[in-house]
Amino acid sequence: MENDDIVWAIINKSFCSYKVNTKTQRFCRNEYNLTGLCNRSGCPLANSQYATVREEDGNCFLYMKTVERSGFPRNMWEKVKLSKSLEKALRQINEYLVYWPGFIKQKCKQRLLKISQYLIRMRKLRLRRQKKLVPIQRKQERRERRREEKALVAARLDSAIEKELLERLKRGTYGDIYNFPQVAFNKALEEEEDAEVNMEGEDYGEDEENEGEEAEEEIDEELEKELEEESENEEIEYVEADSDLERELESESDMEDMEPKATKSVKDNTRRKPRLEIEYETENLSENTKRTV
């Protein structure tokens, strides 16, 4: 059987691959270490009865090592999943480590608390909006920029040469000296014609738009003129109607003024000249005539 004291004496005084020495203290890099320090009580190799808490994919597990399983290194550590609730997980640790030393029990609880705290912080950080750092390859960008500039200069030069040659061919500078392919020449001419047609189509479209706008403006002006004329006609009719009413009223007032004057004159005449009836008798006439004066 292995003796823990002998193992610790070898590890402490000689070489250990998990040990890290610093100026102040020594650390342990073993994944099953409970405290992270290289000492007698916290060494997982020098203790046949040992327990620790580990986190895997957001879940906490309790790992236990006993003397009975020391002969089978594959099955040396017993793995128990702990609840996500901190209270239930602490109760589980108390149940599984009932007769274990108090130091291991206390350190397992502390480790569980620290792991649960950093898991909570991780969840909060995931929910927040974070900045993503993207590395920039400056050499590659510079190289691509240079290539783009060179390609642009070459394209401009080729297009300028092509235009100059086409103009010279149109003018007949070379005459029959060179035998240029007629297909390429015709193709270039067709492209120029298409470009001119497109420009004319755009100008025609702009002219149509301008004509449409002018027609709309003319229609608006005609409508405004009609509305003004209607308003003026209404005012004239209103004035004419008022003048007719005034005339009628004046004629009525004149008639009223004339009526009392006529009645007064008749009354005066009757008073001044009374009516008389005179009878004349003649012998020659057979019938008596009565005249009224």
Image (cartoon, rainbow, N blue to C red):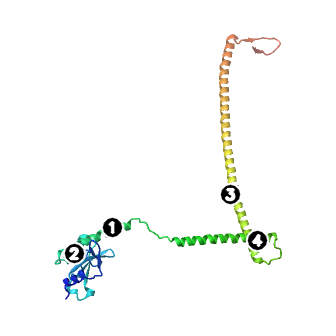
- Per the image, label 1 sits on a secondary structure element best described as helix
Between 86 and 147, the one lying in front of the other is 147
Q: Residues within 10 Å of mark 3 (few under 14, many from 20)?
A: few
Give the foreground label among 4 and 2.
4
**Residue 200 falls in which quadrant of the image?**
bottom right
Q: Amino acid at mark 2?
A: Ile
Identified by mark 1, the residue type is Arg
**136 above or below 203?**
below
Instruction: Give the farthest residue toward the left.
Output: 99
Q: Which mark lies nearer to you, 4 or 3?
A: 4
Q: Identify the residue position indicated by label 4 in the image.
A: 166
Q: Quadrant of residue 205?
A: bottom right
Q: Mark 2 and mark 3 in contact (Cβ < 8 Å)?
A: no
Please, what secondary structure does the residue beneath circle 3 have?
A: helix
- Residue that mark 3 sits on: 209
Left or right for 162, reference 68: right
Specify the amino acid type for callout 4.
Answer: Leu
Marks 4/3 in contact by CB < 8 Å: the verdict is no
Total labels drawn: 4
Amino acid identity at mark 3: Glu
User: Which residue is labeled 2 in the image?
Assistant: 93
Question: In the image shown, does 258 or 94 lie closer to the viewer?
Answer: 94
Location of the C terminus by quadrant is top right
User: Which residue is more in the foreground, 287 or 115?
Assistant: 115
Q: Which mark is residue 121?
A: 1
Q: Secondary structure at mark 2?
A: helix
Q: Look at discs 3 and 1 and give the one toward the viewer.
A: 1
